[in-house]
Every structure is written in C-alpha cells, then in structure tokens.
Amino acid sequence: MSALVAVDLDRTMIFSEGALGVPLDDAFECVEVYEGKPLSYMSARSISLLRELSESVVVVPTTTRTIEQFRRIALPGAPWRYAITSNGGNILADGEPDMHWRNGFELDLVGIGAELRSRVSEDWVLKYREADGLFCYLVVDTTAVPEDFVAEWSQWCAARDWNVSQQGRKIYTMPNAVCKSSAVAEVRSRLIQDGTLDADARVFAAGDGALDAEMLIAADAAIRPRHGELELLGFTRPGLTVTDSSGVRASEEILEWLRNRTAVRRV
C-alpha cells in the first residue's frame, strides 16, 4: 500500500450531539455509549466514507483518549491493525497495547500532578484525571478559570519539557515526549518493515486540536476542520488544507479529501 492515514477522532471523525453543528436525526448513527447513554455520533455519509477508505489504505485511529475510552467507540472500519491512543503514549497492535513502546517513556507524572493540584481550586476545577499513567488533565468550569492560569502553568511546564493545551472544558498537561507524530512514525516504520506499506508510503493526517498540530506538520499532507482549537489559533502550514465546513459536515469533507488524495496514488 502507498499511504497511511492517521485520523484524530473526537470532533474530527466523531461528535457529541452538541458538537454536530446540525440537528440530530436519522441520518446519524451512535458510535459510542457511555453509562448507558448515547455519547458520540457519525453521519451515515462519514461512516460509508471511513469504511471505504479503510478498505483501500492503512487507516490508523489516532487519539488522545485512553485505551479504555477508545475501546468504547464502535468505529467503522474496525478491526484495526494499529491504533494510537493516549496522545501517542500507547500503540495498540491488533487491539492490544504494545508494552515495549509504552515502557519507553520515563515520566514524573506524580510530581507534575502534585504541582498542578497545588495550583488549582475546586471553585473552577470539576475533575482531575490521570490518563494511562502518561499525562493528566483537568475538567474545568471555563467561565471561572483564572485568566492567567494556562499561561503561567504552561511556562512552568515548558521548563520541564511538558506542555499545556486547553480543548473545551479540558486542560491537558502533556510530556513533550508523548506525541501523536512520533507514534505515527513508529507505526509507519513497522508497516514498511513487514511489507504492508511501500518504502516511500506517504502519510496523510487529520485533526482539530493543538495536540494534533505536530502530527499535521509531520504528515506529507494534512487537513483540519474549520472548527476546534486549531481554528481558534488560526493554525496553517504548507500542505495543510482547511475544510469549508464545520461540525459533522467537516468530517465528511475530510474523508472525501482523504479518499481523493490517496486515490491518486492508487491509480
């Protein structure tokens, strides 16, 4: 095969009802249930396009979700030879975590987490969570977060090779070593070694958040939706396409773009 496609999931491929951007109706299918309630959806068009794409090129779901959170999703095109979770901290090979890859990270999450908790208040933090022993995040009341918190916390973290990213109600604290682009490069290398991918296979990527930026930059060509954190940042680069649509219609546009771009190489 001549292409690997790395796709972010939340707000790129799958959407909560509130993030769809259009009314929920019979044209959508629930792809994730949490605590007995529908949580994430895809349009029938996106489902068809993703299945079609996964039959012709290597598709690698690439998400900041934990392994447990990823496994809740009934993503069209499964089973996946490889999937990337935990923002690149875990590579799933045939559904199981590759412990050699996971154990390659030496992180002081305990120390980072303790410092973070010393800086926050229950007045605006709803939850503190650690993800697969790799990074941590806050769920916050966005209207009550102190104006200078993210900037000051980012500065403290940067001096220790960690970074901070806010996506909606979540504020992530992430080690620089844990990133999607490195995991995508590792998967590409493995697939070339086993003969699945051609030696000159190109990488295409799609994502909407700041944690996707390195992956989009590293790809041979990339696309992002006209919504999300990268849209707010005005993120651009050579070789990056931005959709005309936002919300769930952007996911359809992204998948059509990926199909057309990879089809050129298959002719």
Image (spheres, rainbow, N blue to C red):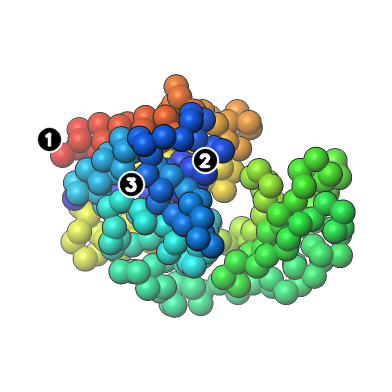
Element at badge 1?
loop
| Residue at which label 1 appears | 267
Residue 12 seen from this side: yes
Q: Position of residue 208 (x, y in %)?
A: 52, 39
Distance from the alpha carbon under mark 1 to that under mark 3:
17 Å
User: Mark 1: few, some, or many residues within 10 Å (few <14, many ≥20)?
Assistant: few
Residue 180 seen from this side: no
Of label 3 and label 2, which has the lower sequence position?
Answer: 3
Element at badge 2?
helix
Instruction: Tell me the kind of residue under disc 2.
Output: Glu
Distance from the alpha carbon under mark 3 to that under mark 2:
26 Å
Q: Name the image quarter holding residue 52.
A: top left
Residue nearer the viewer, 35 or 164? 35
The residue under the point 87% across, 58% down is: 121
Instruction: Tell me the kind of residue under disc 3.
Output: Val
Of label 1 and label 3, which has the lower sequence position?
Answer: 3
| Residue at which label 2 appears | 17
The residue under the point 43% across, 44% down is: 41
Compared across the picture, whether 2 is left or right of 10 comes to left
Q: Position of residue 10 (x, y in %)?
A: 50, 47
Instruction: Tell me the kind of residue under disc 1.
Output: Val
Of label 1 and label 2, which has the lower sequence position?
Answer: 2
Distance from the alpha carbon under mark 1 to that under mark 2:
38 Å
Q: Position of residue 120 (x, y in %)?
A: 85, 58
Q: Position of residue 71 (x, y in %)?
A: 43, 64
| Residue at which label 3 appears | 5
> Looking at this rendering, what residue extends furthest in the left direction?
267
The residue under the point 73% across, 63% down is: 128
